[in-house]
Image (cartoon, rainbow, N blue to C red):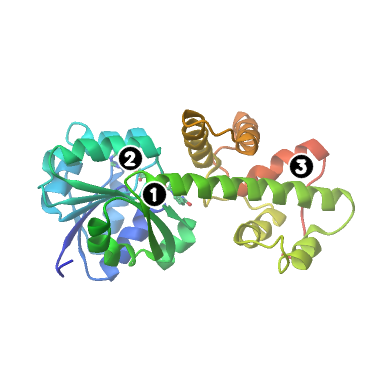
Amino acid sequence: MKDGVTIGFIGLGIMGKPMSKNLLKAGYTLVVYDVVKAAVDEVVAAGATAGSSSADVASKADIVITMLPNSPHVKEVVLGAGGVIEGVKKETIVVDMSSIAPLAAQEVAAELAKKSVKMLDAPVSGGEPKAVDGTLAIMVGGPEDVFEKVKPILLKMGASAVLCGDVGAGNVTKLANQIIVALNIAAMSEALTLAQKAGVDPGKVFDAIKGGLAGSTVLNAKAPMVLNGNYKPGFRIELHIKDLQNALDTAHDIGVPVPLSAGVMEIMQALKVEGKQTDDHGGIIQFYEKLAGVKVRSELT
Ligand code: NAD
């Protein structure tokens, strides 16, 4: 990939903002767009230029990155009126880094292919802290030659970028990631609630087990938060509901029963009914606290 490349960046939310700022820090020229003007202003203040629409951004960019909530947003931004598809040149590469349904990624790629435009799906894991540090784990689907061209740019936002297969494979990998994270948080919540009601300090439990087989990145990130009653996102329950819905739909389409994912989905739905959908997904523990009639807290974290 030549130096002096212009990157279009669309979707400047919790993740897109720090990711775009890391590309600016790495010396790339950025043209950015979001429907929220304050988000655009912040990234422009860091050195980017504002585009007037997704099509405008695409017309000025060699590579267009999108970081949007879900499949309908990506379809609208890329294929809709005033969308990326209206502005792209055929050498432009589109990289969708949102977490969406694998089928939606394939549909968007197929429409872009009609204009000879290549696309990668490249969702991420790591959350806001790793987006800020530029250490995300990036899982990619698409043609290998396109991946190799874009990889240096991805590695300005992530510590790793792994090609998992054709377009859609990035999002299949992300669904697997989201199943593992959701089930880990639920397991942690169940276990720490048991400890609390049994009269054992859950902070001590965390301390004692974190170096053993039950230790995990999820446990290290979420236990200190929940033991302080801190559910500030991070990753909102409503976004995890979106990912588990995509996981359930995808799994059922291809004949894969996912009973534990379905169970955690219902826990998240119960929390949504209580208005907790904007809490961090560590807030899953509130479901267990209510069932057991305890608050899970520790002075030790
Ligand atoms: P967010 O809601 O904070 O940001 C999305 C941005 O897209 C917003 O700024 C919104 O204004 C913008 N947007 C929506 N529709 C648009 C349109 N039509 N045109 C232009 N801009 C539009 O979400 P986020 O937390 O940044 O997450 C983005 C994606 O990354 C999601 O798919 C999410 O699942 C995934 N993700 C998030 C995290 C996390 O911890 N937040 C971690 C890994 C992956």
In what quadrant of the picture does the N terminus appear? Answer: bottom left
| Kind of residue indicated by mark 1 | Gly
Residue found 82% across the figure and 39% down from its top: 292
| Kind of residue indicated by mark 3 | Glu
Circle number at residue 105: 2
Q: Badge 1 is on which residue? A: 170
Q: Is mark 3 within 8 Å of ligand 1?
A: no
Q: Is mark 1 within 8 Å of ligand 1?
A: no
Q: Nearer the viewer, residue 166 or 78?
A: 166
Q: Nearer the viewer, residue 109 or 19?
A: 109
Residue found 52% across the figure and 52% down from its top: 234
Q: Quadrant of ligand 1?
A: top left
Is the Cβ of the residue at disc 1 closer than 8 Å to that at disc 2? yes
Q: Nearer the viewer, residue 201 or 35?
A: 201
| Kind of residue indicated by mark 2 | Ala
Marks 3 and 1 sit apart, C-alpha to C-alpha, by 35 Å
How far across and how far down the image is residue 271, in percent? 63, 35
Residue 220 sits above or below residue 123 on the image: below
Mark 1 Cα-neighbour bin, 10 Å: few <14, some 14–19, many ≥20: many
Q: Badge 3 is on which residue? A: 289
> Mark 3, mark 1: which one is toward the viewer?
1
Residue found 68% across the figure and 63% down from its top: 215
Left of 264 or right of it: where is 252?
left
Label 1 residue SS: helix
Label 2 residue SS: helix
Which of disc 2 and disc 1 is earlier in sequence? 2
Which of disc 1 and disc 3 is earlier in sequence? 1
Mark 3 Cα-neighbour bin, 10 Å: few <14, some 14–19, many ≥20: some
